Amino acid sequence: MNEQSQETQRGVILALSAYTMWGIAPIYFKTLQAVSPLEILSHRVIWSFFFIAAIIWVSKSWGKVRAVLRQPKTLLLLVATSLLVGGNWLIFIWAVNNNYMLDASLGYYINPLLNVMLGMIFLGERLRPLQWFAVALAACGVGVQLIQFGSLPWIALALATSFGFYGLMRKKIRLDAQTGLFMETCLLLPMAACYVLLIADSPTSDWSVNPMSTNLLLMAAGIVTTVPLLCFTGAATKLKLSTLGFFQYIGPSLMFLLAVTVYGESFTLDKGYTFAFIWGALLLFSFDGIKGHRHARKLACTS
């Protein structure tokens, strides 16, 4: 097996791990419904910072962090990625804890198709005819909801857009997963610490009166946040953006099943129309991806 194949294989394993963990993440956030979304977000940032700092310390990777600090252009891009991922986290937490998990699921179904478009526009990746048709079907799904029901799936679109651009920019930075995420949490840390220490005024903001279970769950936000995101950013540097999009069906499918079967969210008619178009688009996209992969393998075997 050549080096490129090994890199691709590692990318596939990392992508599968990331999206499975993201798919079941709502279970964790549902246990923290008593805590405000901004408070949970702040703890995600703070404990992720300490968790990744420990990883960097153990792996003796501080040299990579110092190297980034000497690159103003990379730092500027990391400011943008930190704001994108922070915004995505906040929207997701709010959606899950306010019973909009189906909307969150829809957002991450749209995301692979958005990734294809971003890959074409910014990375010069070419779209095949079936991919174009899949993207058009997804657009129809959003359009039907707007025309028929007079509303847009704002939560879904915000999640898809923020995470799509996050993936694109992290791919362009070409920074290893732990260093990039450490820098992002560093940049978000002052705001998070300020909120927790000076602004938050909720029943759960005083750790001395919280149940130990709540405090431990908040501390676990570092692990819940960091591990799948490290897997994702690792996969993003090893796979084409359009290939990475293929694996994203795992997360929203698990989320969809949890929303309907465990948490009792209503699958209304407007969501039904939109999901039907998106699922149709993803079936086409998957078929095209499998066909393209087989064609590439045949070419590789004959060369």
Image (cartoon, grey):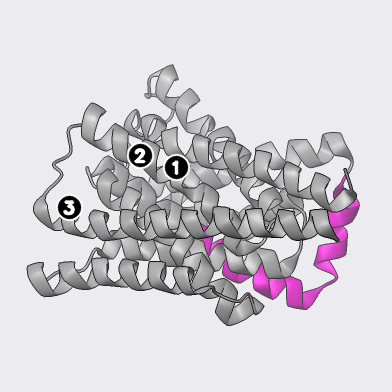
Residue 8 on image: x %, y %: 74, 49
Q: Nearer the viewer, residue 284 or 150?
A: 284
Q: Assign a secondary structure to mark 2.
A: helix
Magenta stretch contains residue 63: yes
Q: Which mark is residue 255?
A: 2
Instruction: Give me the residue at 75% from left, 78% from top.
Output: 73
Region rendered in magenta: 61-85
Q: Assign a secondary structure to mark 1.
A: helix
Q: Nearer the viewer, residue 226 or 120?
A: 120
23 shown above or below 131: above
Residue 151 on image: x %, y %: 15, 69
Q: Nearer the viewer, residue 292 or 60?
A: 292
Per the image, the residue denoted by label 3 is: 272
Asked if residue 85 shows in the view, the reply is: yes
Kind of residue sitting beneath label 2? Met
Q: Nearer the viewer, mark 3 or mark 1?
A: 3
Kind of residue sitting beneath label 3? Gly
Q: Quadrant of residue 55?
A: top right
